[in-house]
Image (cartoon, rainbow, N blue to C red):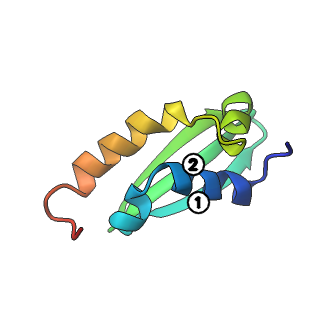
Amino acid sequence: MHVTADILAERIKAFYPEFDRYNMSLAVRDDTAKNAWVVEISRGGHRLDTYIEHKDAKNCAEGRECVHLSTQIGQFVRNYCGESCAT
């Protein structure tokens, strides 16, 4: 499967319902210099950029797993979407 930013973003959102639940934004772009995808998570002026190696992004896009993001997304939710977020 050829991975695109749109496919990867769609799959990430499918794995992590927190994006819709907490009204978080997601942007994905390919950083060819680092040979990785950049995943930008933001909410209310807070932003986190994290990188996913192309091999891991392919697994995620094919529906297997997005393990690397679990920790990053969980930490972002705890820091910026705690009890103050509407559910």
Q: Which quadrant, please, contains the N terminus?
A: top right
Instruction: State the CA–CA distance, disc 1 to disc 2.
Output: 6 Å
Quadrant of residue 28 within the rendered picture: bottom right
Q: Which quadrant, please, contains the C terminus?
A: bottom left
Q: Is residue 61 above or below residue 64?
A: below
Circle 1 sits in a helix, a strand or a loop, which is it? strand
Q: Is residue 33 left or right of 26 when viewed as pictured?
A: right
Quadrant of residue 54 within the rendered picture: top right
Residue appearing at x 58%, y 37% in the figure: 51
- Check whether the beta carbons of the residues at disc 1 and disc 2 lie within 8 A of each other: yes
Q: Is residue 47 left or right of 13 when viewed as pictured?
A: left
Q: Is residue 87 left or right of 61 when viewed as pictured?
A: left
Quadrant of residue 59 within the rendered picture: top right
Compare residues 17 and 26 and report the one nearer the observer: 17
Rendered location of residue 83, percent (x, y): 13, 59
In this view, which residue lies farthest toward the right?
2
Residue appearing at x 19%, y 55% in the figure: 82
Q: Is residue 63 above or below residue 42?
A: above
Residue flagged by tag 1: what amino acid is it? Answer: Ala
Query: Going from the N terminus, do you reach mark 1 or mark 2 first?
Result: 1
Circle 2 sits in a helix, a strand or a loop, which is it? strand
Check disc 2 and report the residue beneath it. Answer: 39
Check disc 1 and report the residue beneath it. Answer: 27
Q: Is residue 39 left or right of 32 when viewed as pictured?
A: left
Residue appearing at x 73%, y 47% in the figure: 30
Q: Residues within 10 Å of mark 2 (few under 14, many from 20)?
A: many
Compare residues 46 and 24 and report the one nearer the observer: 24
Q: Which mark is residue 68?
A: none
